[in-house]
Image (cartoon, rainbow, N blue to C red):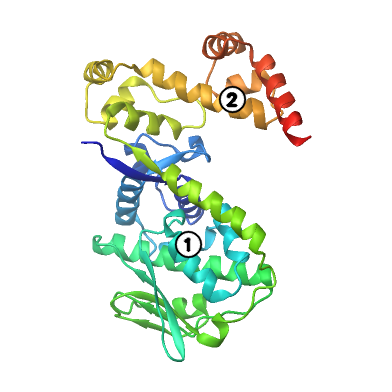
Amino acid sequence: MLRAMSTRSILGLMYTAQALQQLGEDIAPVLARQGLALDRLDPGARIDRAVELRIYTEIAESLRDPLAGLKSGRSFGFAGYGPLSMLLITCARGLDAIRTGIHYQELTYLYCGLDFTPGERASALVLAPPALPQRAFRFRIDGEMAGTFKLLRDIQTTLGVQIKPERVDMPYPRPSEAETYEAQFGCPVRFGETQARFWFHNDDLQRPFPTHDPTAQALYRRLCDEQLLAQQCDLSSLAQRVLLHLELHEARPPDAAGIARLFGLSERSLRRHLSAENTSLRALVGQVRYRKARLLLEQTPHSVEAIAGQLGYAEPAAFIHAFRRWSGRSPLAFRSAARRAAGDAQR
């Protein structure tokens, strides 16, 4: 039976990991156990949501600062949400933006489930917490509440519209650092609740957005729908799981022994399983390199030599030979054809 899993952009993990490093937290060992290194992650890659959550759970156990989740959540940039950020600011009003965000919540970096609780005077944006060990629970709640608040603040700054929460609810007992939370959110914070919530006055949610644009919104909605489809990945085969892991690395791919250990196999067993699926590790590495090579040739001005180095080739000649084998033409010929095609499409 095929196992359709959800993947998402690696940017969420990168933002969090970079922020934790800046806070002095040592997360490298946790990433290394997953065969990853922060400085080698490809920002354009996707990661299995279950793998990402496992990384967060391990990180939480090693954190020294109990406020690390709250602090790291501030690092999420508005542009990092891609088309979703543009879809939200083209909505007609705050309430519509919240409902749109809930519909497309799988495009966010949340593990909490988003929902909306309407009320007579005030209504709540609800983040239903996932079932996690105690330290991981607080780390994820704090990070996701801080990240959501940062997104709301970024939208307000972009639009010049003031939509501040009246109160924030947190689903764990009051910590000794409670005053930091009130300073963070700029409102009273109530602990010991069953869910995490931002409470907004209903009048604020009805404020019109000056950037409302139905035509642009239709475009960004289509892009978000396409992203939702792209996030569904068949990980029923070992080859697909290895391919997804290889995509995470920006430059030189990990060696066979490292990949085998990650999947609990000997190197010989890894090769045997891949052979049974009519592929090989070399073929999968080539598939990833070819895709990334095409993107670099099409979208950057980098020289062939620079691209070869970025893909992990010791010599440009080896890259050129491999690219000819994949595409039937040289990298420069491919780039010229891609630019001509792009020029024709703009006419």
Query: Residue most toward the bottom?
Result: 121
Most foreground residue, 35 or 24: 35
Q: Residue at x 65, y 58 (%)?
A: 216
Residue 244 in the image: state x and y as whole percent. 39, 33
Vertical arrangement, residue 263 with respect to residue 94, above or below: above
Q: Residue 334: which quarter of the image?
A: top right
Q: Residue at x 36, y 61 (%)?
A: 140
Numbered-mark total: 2
Q: Which comes sooner in the sequence, label 1 or label 2?
A: 1
Most foreground residue, 232 or 62: 232
Q: Please state if 18 lies on the left or on the right of 139 as rendered.
A: right
For residue 167, the mark is: none
Vertical arrangement, residue 36 with respect to residue 288, above or below: below
Q: Please state if 327 lies on the left or on the right of 126 as rendered.
A: right
Kind of residue indicated by mark 1: Gly
Instruction: Categorize mark 2 by other alpha carbons within 10 Å: few (<14), some (14-19), many (20+).
Output: some
Which residue is the site of mark 1?
A: 73
Q: Determine if residue 201 is in view.
A: yes
Residue 311 in the image: state x and y as whole percent. 54, 23
Q: Residue at x 24, y 62 (%)?
A: 131
Which one is closest to the eye, mark 1 or mark 2? 2
Query: Residue most toward the right?
Result: 347
Vertical arrangement, residue 27 with respect to residue 196, above or below: above
Residue 186 in the image: state x and y as whole percent. 53, 81
Kind of residue indicated by mark 2: Arg
Residue 126 in the image: state x and y as whole percent. 39, 73
Instruction: Categorize mark 1 by other alpha carbons within 10 Å: few (<14), some (14-19), many (20+).
Output: many
Cα distance, mark 1 to mark 2?
34 Å
Which residue is the site of mark 2?
A: 294
